[in-house]
Amino acid sequence: MSSVDWKNYKPTLIPDIDGLEKIDVYEKNGGYKAFKSVLTENDKWPDEKSVIDEVKAANIRGRGGAGFNAGLKWSFMPPADGKPRYLACNGDESEPGTFKDRKIFEYNPHVFIEGALIAAYAMQVTTIYVYIRGEYLVYVKMMEKAIQDAYDKGYIGKNILGSDYSVDFYVHMGAGAYICGEETSMLESLEGKRGYPRVKPPFPAQKGLWGRPTTINNIETLAHVPSVINNGADWFSSIGAENHPGPFLYGISGHVNRPGVYELPSGVPVLDLIHEVAGGMRNDKKLKAVIPGGSSTPVVRADQLEGITMDSDSLRSVGTMVGTAGMVIMDEDTDMVDMLWRIAHFYHHESCGQCTPCREGTGWLEKVLLKIKNGEGEVKDLDLLLDVTTQMEGRTICALADAAAWPVRHTINRFRDEFEARCKKSVHAVA
Amino acid sequence: MPEVFIDGQRYEYEGDHKLLQFIQDIGLEVPFFCYHPAMSIPANCRQCMVKVGQPVQNRETGEFELDDDGNREIRWFPKLQTACNINVADGMVVRTQVTDELVQRAQKDNLEMILINHPLDCPICDQAGECPLQIQTYKYGPEGSRFEVKKVHKPKRVQLGPRVVLDAERCINCTRCTRFTQEISKTDQLTITSRGDKNYPITAPGREFDDPYSLNTVDLCPVGALTAADFRFKARVWEMNQTPSIDITNGKGCNIDIWTRDNLVLRVTPRQNEHVNDYWMPDEGRLAYTRFNENRISRPAQKLDGEQILSSWNNAIATIAEQIEEHKNEETLVIGSAHASVEENYVLSKFSNMMGLNNPVFTPHIEEGKGDGFLISDDIAPNTNGCRLLGFDEKDPKSIANQIEKASLILILSDDLIDRGVLASEHFEGKFVIAFGTNHSKTTKNADLVIPITSAAEHAASYVNVDGRIQRTIPAKETKYTNRRLNLEMSEGRLDRYGTSFDNWVTEDNKVDCMPLWLFISQVANESGLELDYSDYSAGRQIMDEIAESIPAFKGVNYQKMDEESGIQLDSSAKKVKS
């Protein structure tokens, strides 16, 4: 395994520059250069397709958790027909353990705006929406200001920079539902409806917002686009892990000395992130477990982590996923039963209630876990929980049921002794 | 022709089909709750899971790849698919619960999930007996439940609107009701509130679910979550008799089922007919069930010294015959009715002609602006076009009043002319008025002789709707002179077949002392020495044959054809009649 040289990495998304959220400072530091180049340097970017091809070659895998090649996603948009087309930017990050996009909103909103504009131009989108979760009220205000500044500078609006390309950019605030971070559910919410995920097909690229072609990208995904345009696809794909390249925003939380968001290449060893980047375990406790990419990704035991790096291939070898790279670090004092109940509680609370297995299953999981947590569970309940997870997985419209089922299944499987210790023995009547 | 393989059987098809609908159309079954052929497909109940695959084709030759046994190699979808929203495709291979254990297991799992928060109150639930959840659970569900923790509690007995009551705990969130108000009635009055296992349908705060079609949601509800305020706790479905019929409360003629127990009509539900009402009907038509039970005229009545007293059939027959003989023909006025059937109007006009009286007149019963372009028409009467096609003289209310002033003997068929403002009670002064009717009304109250005739729930007769479609009723309740076991057309419920005299619901109490107009008129004609033989209770069939032969507009119409084709669209010239 090639080790990633993360110590000499220079951040591009959240570099250490004072006042970068101001458009002047951003421009002074090379901001909007990529967008100008795409719009005006015809020899370098003869058409929209050349932009898509470059991004596709960079292999920016979606940072919202699914890890799909962003450029490839853009290429699914049908040819422009003069009618409205949309880019919906997903800033609803609500997965427990994930708090990276807020860093962009807060410190470098323009890199996202520029990325979104390049994406919009590449797909000939007429309107951009950025959907920001309601809890981020401060960042909503900041984004609104940043977008207004970009309008004032002429980066958004009619005939941008003298070209014949025009686009509008709107902020839409969520109202506190996790499910609205699911892409099709977000579209429903943008349309002013109840956030119910849509049945696919049709996919958003065919029928999205108001039935028109729409692409949905994560905030961080789009924020990577300007540097790909400036430095080229090869530069981007040379950073970090081969199959999952580029910088990551690692959101490290939990029992470490310096929790926070760190921009580093992908493929950094998990243990390096804990012990060097995040300053080691709090109170010098022993590491017990790590959730690598938000609460829905399966938890990994400390003894599985040797040599494991933060990229999809390496994490797959221990049965988990990179997700949003929102890492939750747990020390030896962590009660896995409590932890799992809390996660199950979250998914129960957030299930939209559309599909039967998720609506009923999430509640069932939580209630049984609560019983176990309270010391009233029986060992047979653990098998029931595992059964219920198989009854939920893969049988619903969106992936919330999967997201709720995986942590339960894997936490029980990986810490079964701890769960059994909390359970009463199943008593079987003897004749 | 494209082909599809379902559980190893090959079926050919044409056009576009959703798999679940296709499976139903060929007579197979896959359980489901949220799907409805007339509405959008949300695929949210997740019950109709099946295994679906496509044959593998060679990219170059396009030929199907074969496995070692020479069978087509199938690439199965990685997950089970909901049959409701998947399109049937050429070569598709489908395994349902019949042949696939995983599918069977998935459907069972899903039912277990649905039931964990569903109250098991079937013994007191109105839906029991006609409940898709109950039926599918018996067929495909688990034997017990492993759910040992606390169920979710939600609001019960919520009066959503004047006619619909919600029990949110029974709701399985199929969204059929909310989709109905969005897509069919287009009032958008219902939505789902809350999230996850706490969600249920409700109106916006402070609003009422007073949609004129609100009761359709009760039929659509696959469980007992939505019940009719009117019918709740009235009867178990298996105690009732279900009889196909026609809605006679407006000109649209929605196809309905009449549900009776002990000869009381307890509810009316729509019956599917794509040419008329699809699956729906207005609430007004359902609530009219009371008119079959209440305020009925039972036994003839005659006015003596200004007061109506009950009389006998013999006296009624003799009195009419006498009155007609006494009065000059030109002083007699026969008024037909758009509220009565084609057969009744025909017999009345035939009798009128035989006696040398006038060709019957009638006046349509229209309420301008009442119609909504959907299933409610301006026309309040079910048979206006029937009267027109029979060649009755169509009069406006004023000229009817004028004619009445000239007459001294008046025969009025089943039409409350006083209440709807065509006549005033003063018009009857100094004249002898004979009213045929099903229910007491201002008109019958002011008549000198009242003859009770059978209602649409008691006889077989036809009505021509506003679009010129002729449809017929089937007797649903008995009269004093009929017997369910002897009338081959009447439906026999469980209790009729298996009930004993100890079953207290078989009584004489609710049988009305009335007879079909044709039967009564035949007797009057015979009394007057004329030959008119519609002496069978079920003579409607014979009368319609006679009409079809003698009146061109009804050519080819008969009961059998009406039954087979759920009504007959009369020819284009008939369609032109004013609605």
Image (cartoon, coloured by chain):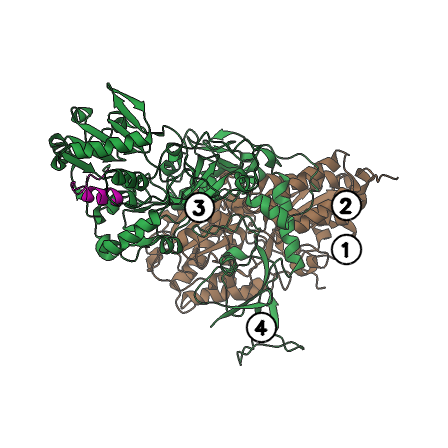
Chain colours: A brown, B green
Tell me the number on the disc at residue A288.
2
Secondary structure type for disc 1: loop
Q: Which residue is mark 4?
A: B56
Q: Is residue B108 visible?
A: yes
Q: Can you name the residue that lies furthest to the bottom here?
A: B61
Q: Nearer the viewer, mark 2 or mark 4?
A: 4
**Residue B339, image x, y percentages:** 28, 39
Labels 2 and 3 share a subunit: yes
Labels 2 and 1 share a subunit: yes
Q: Which residue is mark 1?
A: A306
Front residue of A271 and B433: B433
Q: CA distance from mark 4 to mark 1?
A: 43 Å
Q: Is residue B354 shown in magenta?
A: yes
The three-letter amino acid code for the residue at tag 3 is Leu
Q: Which residue is mark 3?
A: A190
Give the extent of the magenta segment.
B346-366
Q: CA distance from mark 3 to mark 4?
A: 40 Å
The three-letter amino acid code for the residue at tag 1 is Glu
Would you place residue A201 above or below residue B324 in this image? below
Would you place residue B244 above or below residue B318 in this image? below
Q: CA distance from mark 2 to mark 4?
A: 47 Å
If you read the primary sequence from the N terminus, does the residue marked by circle 2 or circle 3 appear first? 3
Q: Residues within 10 Å of mark 4 (few under 14, many from 20)?
A: some
